[in-house]
Image (tube, rainbow, N blue to C red):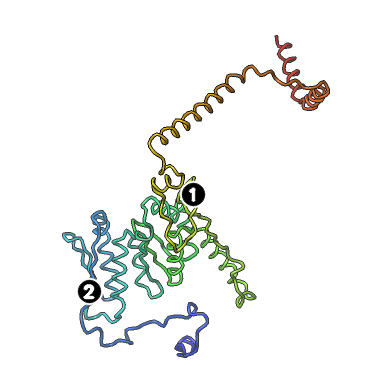
Amino acid sequence: MSDSETEEPKQTNEPIENAWAMKIPAFKPEDNPNGLVEESSFATLFPKYREKYLKEVWPLVQQTVAEYHLKAELDLIEGSMVVKTTRKTWDPYIIIKARDMIKLMARSVPFEQAKRVLQDEIGCDIIKIGSLVRKKEKFVKRRQRLIGPNGATLKSIELLTDCYVLVQGNTVAALGPYKGLQQVRDIVIDTMNNVHPIYNIKALMIKRELMKDPKLANEDWSRFLPKFKNKNISKRKQPKVKKQKKEYTPFPPAQPESKIDKQLASGEYFLNKEQKQQRKQEERNAKQSEAAKKQEEKRQKDFIPPTEDSPSAARKRSADGDNKLDVKALKAKLAKANKKMKKA
């Protein structure tokens, strides 16, 4: 082995420009020769429909975890899976990885994919999307938008992030490198918040192409990326007749006039009984005469002769009528009539 391969990464307190490019040092049995002090175990429940599949693949699960000196138990009565450490287990974090593996298997991830989480560079993320959208119809539509037609959108997300993504019920299970998991989470949450996944997919594709150009390494990429504009206006139905709000005044409104106040203002309050009756009769007569006048006008309307135009005005009107004549429409009408005559 060369010196460069055996050389350990230098520890510095300076800020790191690209943390994703750093290689994680491998944890070996020599790093923990004494093993673990106590036994650790994790259990997870699985649904009834997964029982048959888990029963078939469980020997493979036990064989895989045995490579890391772990034990796996399947309880079909309680419907649970358990992973435990042994005396030979030397990696303290492998039990967490095994717990993630059985969690993924309980959420319908196939064993061939779930076992990849035991690798150091691979992680998993279970995103809960059930509580992000209130209405069930909207939730179903947005979840379907994440999958896409024939799973095309989900497949493109997998290719761009190098992750395995499974949409199941109220959760999205993602499995892959840690950078890809972060991108998957952003896409899923944005989709549930009514941002179409195509915007994030386009952004990832553009970033992938920009990374190839060393000239743009230190430049701002925001001008190349697509910008999402929310065009959703408030869906609340606006009333047809809007009431205009009155200007605010600190003073209370004036007290409405009572019947006595109105009589005092008009002077009716000081009249005697006969005078009041006489005034009412006069008002009644005035209303009747006005109604009779309108009725008479209505009757006489039919007997009013129409106004005749002068000869010059009649000539002008006929000239305007000739100008407005549609020649094209007239030609089309004559041609149609000729065709009918020929057919006959």
Kind of residue sitting beneath label 1? Lys
- Rounded to the nearest angstrom, the CA distance separating label 2 from label 1 is 65 Å
Quadrant placement of the C terminus: top right
Observer-nearest residue: 151 or 233? 233
Q: Earlier in the sequence, mark 2 or mark 1?
A: 2
Q: Of residues 94 and 272, which is closer to you in this image? A: 272
Image position, residue 273 (x, y; %): 38, 36
Q: Residue at x 50, y 84 (%)?
A: 16
Q: Nearer the viewer, residue 162 or 196?
A: 196
**Image location (x, y in percent) of residue 217:** 60, 76
Q: At 20% from the left edge and 79% from the top edge, which residue is drawn?
A: 39
Picture coordinates of residue 170, whole percent (x, y): 34, 58
Numbered disc in front, either 2 or 1: 1
Which residue position holds label 1?
242
The answer to whether 221 appears left or right of 168 in the picture is right
**Along the line of sight, the residue nearer the viewer: 19 or 332:** 332
Quarter of the image where one finds residue 309: top right
- Reading the image, the residue beneath label 2 is 41
Quarter where residue 276 is shown: top left
Q: Residue at x 29, y 80 (%)?
A: 92
